[in-house]
Amino acid sequence: MPSIDADTPLPSSEGITETSSSPASPVNRQRTPSVSITPPSGRTRGESHGLTSAIGNIRLSDTNGRATLSPEPRRSRNGTPRRRRSSTGAVEQHDVADEELPDDAFHSPEFQGAFRDAKQLMSNIQSVLGSSNIHEAHESTMGKLHEDAGRLAAFEYPATRTVGFVGDSGVGKSSLLNSLLDTKGLARTSNNGEACTCVVTEYHYHSRDTLDIRVNLFSIEELQDQLGRLLQVYRTFELHRDEITDAAERQDMEANAKVAKDTFQAMFRGRLTDEAFLIRESYGDVLDRLTRWAADARPSPLRTWTGLSPQVCSNILMALSSEPASRDSPATWPYIRSINRGLILVDLPGLRDLNSARRIITERYLLECNEIFAICNIGRAATDEGVHQVFDLADRARLSNVGIVCTRSDDIDPEESIRDWPGRRARHIEQLLEYIETTNKEIEELKADIEDYEAADLSEHERRELAECREDLRQASIRKQNYDFELKEYLITTRNRIIIDSLTNTYAGRVTDSRAFCVSNTIYWQNRTARKSEAERYLHLSGILQVRKHCISIVANSQRRIATQYMKDQIPALLADIELWVQSGARTASEERREALCQTLDSVERRLRKDFASRAFCRLARGYNEDFTEYVYNSSYSAFCRNFGDYCTPAIGSRNWNEEAMDEMVSDLGGPWEEMCGSLRERQSSMLENADEFADMAIEKLEEHDSVDSLTQALEHRQSIFLAAIEKVNDDFENSLRVLRIESLSGLRSSIFGKAMEPFYNKCNAEFGRGCDARRKAIIRGALSDEDLFTKLMRSLKDSFRASSEATQAKIQEATVEYLRVIEERFDLVRGENVARESEQDPDFRLRVDQVARAGRETMQRVHQVI
């Protein structure tokens, strides 16, 4: 693969002034639619994947990271590069798996050690349960236990988080993603300022050595809608260009018309030979023809490539998500909704992208991200309009998860820095430059001396002097390398600190030091394959390792919660099941006592099924919808009448009409919405309490019998797993409400209100000439005074809420059915004759199973003390 300059420096347009901040201490002295790809992890080390495992659980969506994580090895703090050869002669390079992990409870050695012990226990139990052929019998209970042990032995963290990277064209988003993924050239980069990110591209991390691509396309209806918007923009400018007198308006409309024309050419190369028909024929006829062409050219609805090498994957991805190099063939990107790959890191078009479809999808996508990074060139960080737009969106959508990554941190000149940073910092830079100049002179003198020696016949004394000169040259070269690095490090870290301080002041209260980074993809790739001892300090200076570490930390809390449940409930539940199987074959209870216990089990099971069929579980969605109607839907009508019916736009000032129109309505509905959420939480809490009480009742009934400790333990752990599943459903519902509130009560272009107003904005944009301003305002006033607009908006809101509440109801019922099924199976371990006969078949095997279950209890007691 040819070398790619990841960060071609651009001229800085922002001077850097003296600040009171001191240099940061170095870490180490020494569209539109979307596409998904799964890059491979780094090398594996048995069970230990270190950083690559952690990356595997971030959303680049399907995660498949390993479970155990390696602590960071101790590193030398000596600034002098050390020469070291491996026994095989191969150069030891930096390994992503060795990078420092986040300093949190999940990544602590104690927690990881406990998790490793728990997984090893499951592997041991799986081996013992498979040491007899009993598990191979058809519908064998031991077969199910053996399968469960295998599933727990192969447990992986399923938690994922999505990190969105958004910024203007040419700021280095794709280069940054390549560095974070440690796969050069995977995402296409450009040095000419053209947009490479034509589609939303998700990078899903996984542990295989090959890559997969999965492409999801727009439907024909969605394509027709996009074509209609583009055609209207193009026709409006071409038909009315002579009537547009405002220079700024003309410039904007011309740029938008060019995007429409370029998109048509990309989609219909070979067919769009006569562009004049786009305005010569009627709008409806042209749109029908374009839609037919799109239907003919549209690829199959779902395309998948698997087992790709990085180079092949990069080539396919370039063809899918970017403009083709050849102008003679149609592009694929206009038809693509998304490309999926394994963390999810998401490469997003900028919010200032002239293609409205790409811009709207980016806006909508950001609402779903767990973390958002605005990407910009460090030379324009404080004034970058793309960054401002990301934070404006975050403010309107009430998002607090936005950070900044400044690229090209290496693009800094020492002479300019001396002028920009007078005083102590300038003097330090001058001193380092003097050291470098002095060392360079020393090196040149030594090289000259060596040439003189090598050109003559030498005495023994002169040969010793030659050897001394060569050693002096080696030492001087090392000093030169260290001075060069120290200067680069000082310049970069000082400027990074200044820029981060400036950003935290500019976006005070919205971004903190922990979410602001400065990186150099150039430094990263220049040193990525160098000798590890020489490369480490440069890789740290690149800033890439710090961003990668931050991305991993995003998912740590959810991973810890899932891993804790695995160790506290799932493994003990299996151990209890195994003990029930052993006891079933031991026949320690009399037949009368066993019969009484079976009758109790039957009674408890009937009671559980009856309780979980109650209104609290079967009619939850109806209660949610009643709360919505009471608190929000009924309040909304009066809010609309107060604010929209007599709405009149001010005469001056820049504006977001969506926000202006909705401002008072949002204020009026804020309280009712919070009241509704409070009522919903009460219903959820009541439902959880009921579920807990139902399960407690079952356990209390069983405790009336002797020798049922294993059974009650099994039920307690299954109860915890069930309640956790219900809480997860509730959390998902609350998150869906968060997004629904943004969609309903904000002026975003992708909001319900924004979509409803779009036809009216299109009408305004078609007005030109004398009196056009008054006609445009009349169109907006008429729209905002139209009760039908509000009715449609509220119907859409109500339908979205109902769909979400009914989906939540279905998930709760699914979890309940699964819980009852599991309880039935646990009871069958006691009351089933087949289980007892199976357990009696091989006494030696039953003894081994009993022993490993007891040992497992002891192991898990130690694990629980840690977690």
Image (cartoon, helix red, strand yellow):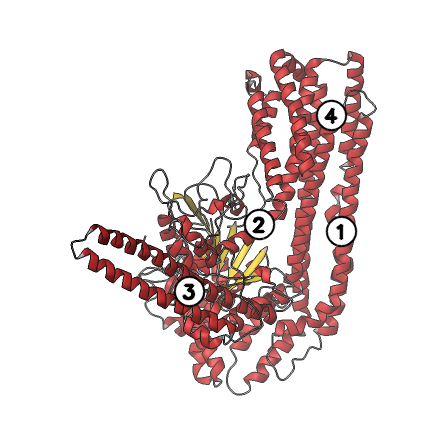
Front label number (4 vs 2):
2
Residue behind mark 3: 195
Q: Determine the secondary structure under disc 4.
A: helix
Q: Which mark is residue 822?
A: none
Front label number (2 vs 1):
2
Instruction: Give neighbour class at mark 2: few <14, some 14-19, many 20+ (Cα, 10 Å).
Output: many
Looking at the picture, which amino acid does disc 2 mark?
A: Pro
Q: Return the residue nearer the eye: 545 or 564.
A: 545
Asked if the residue under mark 3 is in contact with the one under mark 1, i.e. CB atoms within 8 Å, the reply is no
| Name of the residue lying farthest toward the right | 704
Gap in Å between the C-alphas at discs 3 and 2?
A: 34 Å
The answer to whether any part of residue 758 appears in the image is yes
Looking at the picture, which amino acid does disc 4 mark?
A: Leu
Residue behind mark 4: 711
Q: Which residue shows up at 24% across the image and 58% down it?
A: 450
Q: Percent position (x, y) of residue 456? A: 16, 56
Gap in Å between the C-alphas at discs 2 and 1?
A: 33 Å
Looking at the picture, which amino acid does disc 3 mark?
A: Ala
Q: Which residue shows up at 55% across the image and 23% down it?
A: 127
The answer to which quarter of the image holds residue 597 is top right
Gap in Å between the C-alphas at discs 1 and 4?
A: 33 Å
Looking at the picture, which amino acid does disc 1 mark?
A: Arg
Asked if the residue under mark 1 is in contact with the one under mark 2, i.e. CB atoms within 8 Å, the reply is no
Q: Return the residue nearer the eye: 434 or 231.
A: 434
Residue behind mark 2: 102
Residue behind mark 1: 681
Gap in Å between the C-alphas at discs 3 and 4?
A: 62 Å
